[in-house]
């Protein structure tokens, strides 16, 4: 299985698109997904969803926030 850098390079080569801002889009994707997952967590806190699942979504959102932070530091 190719790594992330190989996939991005292949995409750039096969489409001719500029991928220099890839990291920015990766960070944005982490933030967006984390925000969506936190919405699920809020539903769980309101009793509209399974609390155990809500806690898992919240934990995963935290991981995504951390991942976004790591990617920003690498830039």
Image (spheres, rainbow, N blue to C red):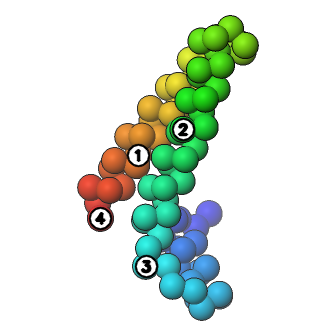
Which residue corresponds to mark 2? 35
Pick whichever of labels 2 and 4 is earlier in the sequence. Answer: 2
* Residue 4, position as x, y percentages in the image: 52, 65
Of the residues under marks 3 and 4, which one precedes in the sequence? Answer: 3
Disc 4 or 1, which lies upstream in sequence? 1
Residue 73 percent across, percent down from the top left: 27, 55
Q: CA distance from mark 4 to mark 1?
A: 13 Å
- Whether the residues at callouts 2 and 3 have beta carbons within 8 Å, the answer is no
- Check if mark 1's residue and mark 3's residue have beta carbons within 8 Å: no
Q: Residue shown at 57%/44% (left/top)?
A: 33
Alpha carbons under labels 1 and 2: distance apart: 14 Å
Q: Nearer the viewer, residue 24 or 6?
A: 24
Q: Residues within 10 Å of mark 1 (few under 14, many from 20)?
A: some
Where is mark 4, residue-wise?
A: 75
Expressed as whole percent of the image width and height from the top left, the position of residue 49 reads 72, 15
Residue 67, numbered circle = 1
Where 64 sits versus 17, above or below? Answer: above
- For label 3, count other residues whose C-alpha is less than 10 Å away and answer few (under 14), some (14-19) or many (20+): few
Q: Which of label 2 and label 3 is nearer to you?
A: 2
Compared to residue 39, the image places residue 52 above or below, namely: above
Q: Nearer the viewer, residue 4 or 32?
A: 32
Residue under label 3: 20
Q: Quadrant of the C terminus?
A: bottom left
Label 4 sits on a secondary structure element that is loop
Which SS class for mark 3? loop
Q: Which mark is residue 44?
A: none
Q: How many marks?
A: 4
């Amino acid at each position: 299985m190719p790594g992330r850098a190989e996939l991005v390079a292949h995409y750039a080569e096969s489409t001719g698109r500029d991928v220099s801002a890839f990291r920015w889009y990766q960070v944005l994707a982490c933030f967006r997904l984390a925000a969506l997952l936190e919405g699920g967590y809020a539903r769980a806190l309101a009793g509209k969803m399974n609390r155990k699942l809500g806690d898992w979504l919240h934990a995963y959102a935290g991981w995504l926030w951390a991942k976004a932070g790591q990617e920003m530091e690498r830039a």
